Amino acid sequence: MARSEQRSVSVERHIAAPAEAIFTVLADASRHCEIDGSGRLVRATSSNIPLTLGSTFSMRVRLGVTYPTKNRVLEFEENRLIAWAHWQGQRWRYELEPSDDGGTLVRETFEWGTARWPRSIELAGAHKKNVLSMEVTLERLAAIVETPPAATPDTDADNAA
């Protein structure tokens, strides 16, 4: 759909971890509940691990009631890009750009221009709510993959004083 670019929201975060470590989490649908910032994902009910182009996976989602949803990976470039959509057509995309410092710029995008009923998403305000949820998702993702800096002898001595 040509209008999909007009119907998307994105958030970015620099994560102090290599793209490979981040992608490993994203390509494992059983870990999506761990990183979900919306609080709506209950559990993965089926998953192809790791996800690849064309893979399908199912999740239990809670939005008032709990229901199953089946997703298909529609875009895939290992360690760089993964995107999936469910039967209604909304798409979730993660783009990873390695940075010179060994970290990765991660961009999460929710695209509803590809949905069967994009106007219903707008009327419900889901596209606006998803921005905050995506920020929390990237925060949780960072917490999982970032390694705290190793303590140095000087740092340990300063902390003990």
Image: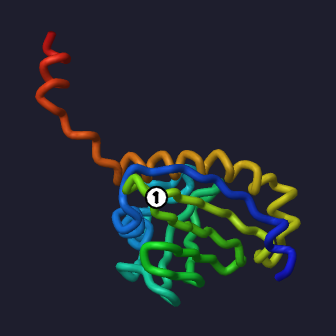
Residue 31 image point, x, y percent? 39, 63
| Residue in the image at 63% along x and 77% along y | 86
Q: Which residue lies furthest to the front in this view?
A: 100
Residue 30 visible in this rendered orientation of the protein: no
The quadrant where residue 7 appears? bottom right
| Residue in the image at 55% along x and 72% along y | 68
Residue at disc 1, secondary structure = loop
Nearest the camera: 13 or 53? 13
Q: Which residue lies furthest to the bottom in this view?
A: 54
Residue 10 visible in this rendered orientation of the protein: yes
Nearest the camera: 96 or 66? 96
- Locate residue 23 relative to residue 161 in the image: left or right: right
Determine which residue is flagged by label 1: 99
The quadrant where residue 107 appears? bottom right
- Locate residue 124 relative to residue 63 in the image: left or right: right
Residue 133 image point, x, y percent? 61, 49
Residue 160 image point, x, y percent? 14, 14
Does 143 sit above or below residue 153?
below
Report the amino acid beneath label 1. Ser
Q: Callout 1: 10 Å neighbours few (<14), some, many (20+)? A: some
The quarter of the picture where the N terminus appears is bottom right
Marks counted in the figure total: 1
**Scheme of colours in the image:** rainbow
| Residue in the image at 11% along x and 28% along y | 153
